Image (cartoon, rainbow, N blue to C red):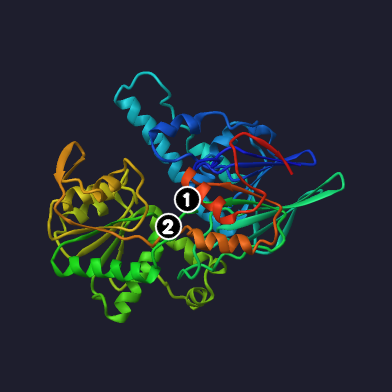
Amino acid sequence: MKLSFHGAAGQVTGSCHLVECGGRRILVDCGMFQGGHELRDDNAGPFGFDPAGIDLVLLTHAHLDHCGRLPLLCKQGFRGEILATSATRDLARLVLLDSAHLHEEEARRHHRHGHRGGRHEALYDTVDALDAIERFGRAAAYGRTLKLFPGITATFFEAGHILGSASIRLELSEAGRARRILFSGDLGPPDRPLLNDAAPPDDADIVVMETTYGDRDHRDLDASVAEFIAAVRHTSRHGGNVIIPTFALERAQELLWFLREAMEEGTLDPDMQVYLDSPMAISATRIFARHPEALRPELAEIVHAGHDPFRLPALHYCREAQESAALNRIRSGAVIMAGSGMCTGGRVRHHLRHNLGNPDSGVVFVGYAAEGTLARIIIDGAKTVKLFGREIPVRARIHTINGFSAHAGATDLLAWHRRTGTPEKTFLVHGEQGPLEGFARRLGGQGVEIAQAGKVYAL
């Protein structure tokens, strides 16, 4: 039995872990490296194993850094089954098709501008994405053990990160030796409004664990929600528009939930015009309603009763480009939620172009902004930013609200690990060096190791 790491080892993204047992090779996640164009070569580079030799893929959840290279895996020869929860399968279909479209657009843009040298063909295209989607087989249910191969079973457990997210326990048996290895996937914080809390098994021999925020905790959620509502209310009263750069999966749905609650409580005007200007977020919101089994019981009851928990009195879905363009004629009173969350692309850049210069408008950032992204540049206090070839003055009020992260903070990560039993070995992945080392210190004791990319570990 062997374990090796081919992504998210010593870095945050690109989750990809290989388990070998009884002549079978099982991949847990196959994610994309994210963070900038400089990572393109990493995504296009070799996996570190033969894709055609992989028998099965287990997918923890549908974020791009966990599923984004599945089409490339299929393109290079993978012909096995992909297993995930039903909700993850639906979201992954959405994410992979969108990713393929973006890769095709990038390749066309390079071709139009006559770039020379380097790799400019699409990493993969829509046909490759469809090939990957066709490989999704049985749907995993939380707590139900699936037989994969002789001597190998898998069980999915709630991870509380995004809809359908899971931690996965593999039970392995080879040559009279048995091991239980638990992959955390990404873990969510407890007590969120939409999803159940993470619920790991208590019998792991080996744990492979994310540490994205392994060295710090998040701000209190209630305080963050109150600040968010106050920012929306302040801008609305001053007559401007509210622009919210929004991540399509989970964040958009949470924000709609909080806006609806505030309107019902009378904190916000129920006639406030709210626009969800993101085809992916709109589709993801519909997928939530299709999967009450992955929601908190009280939310599932609302869905079962035929009600939409995200429907606001004056909510408008903008799917078409012309609908999005029409929003730029609105000078006041609109709340516009649009992607991307880091403002690296998407429709939000057009809304920023038309609203950043208005001192009555507000831009509300509610998610992580990586170094070098437009979101971070604005957050760090730029007086002007360049959009579509023009210098745009930043006069709008800028709000940066922490506490909405879908990742567990250090204290909650530690509590999760303590619930996994008494593992002999814990491998730390999915973190930058500071959080990795910080969480290793928090765990203390023997058997804690920061995973090394490409290294093969005997189980």
> Could you tell me how far apart the alpha carbons at marks 1 and 2 are, in whole angstroms?
8 Å
Q: Secondary structure at mark 2?
A: helix
Asked if residue 85 is positioned above or below residue 35 in the image, the reply reads below
Check disc 2 and report the residue beneath it: 283
| Residue at 26% from the left image edge and 45% from the top image edge | 377
C-beta proximity under 8 Å, tags 1 and 2:
yes
Residue 132 sits in which quadrant? top right
Name which residue type carries label 1: Leu
Q: Which mark is residue 94?
A: 1
Q: Nearer the viewer, residue 87 or 215?
A: 215
Asked if residue 447 is positioned above or below residue 72 in the image, the reply reads below
Name which residue type carries label 2: Ser
Q: Nearer the viewer, residue 167 or 390?
A: 167
Q: Point out residue 16 in the picture as x, y percentages from the top left corner.
A: 58, 42
- Please indicate whether residue 46 sits to the left or right of residue 373 in the image: right
Q: Secondary structure at mark 1?
A: helix
Q: Point out residue 353 in the picture as x, y percentages from the top left corner.
A: 19, 47
Mark 2 closeness class: few <14, some 14–19, many ≥20 residues within 10 Å: some
- Furthest residue to the bottom? 265
- Furthest residue to the right? 176
- For the C terminus, the image quarter is top right
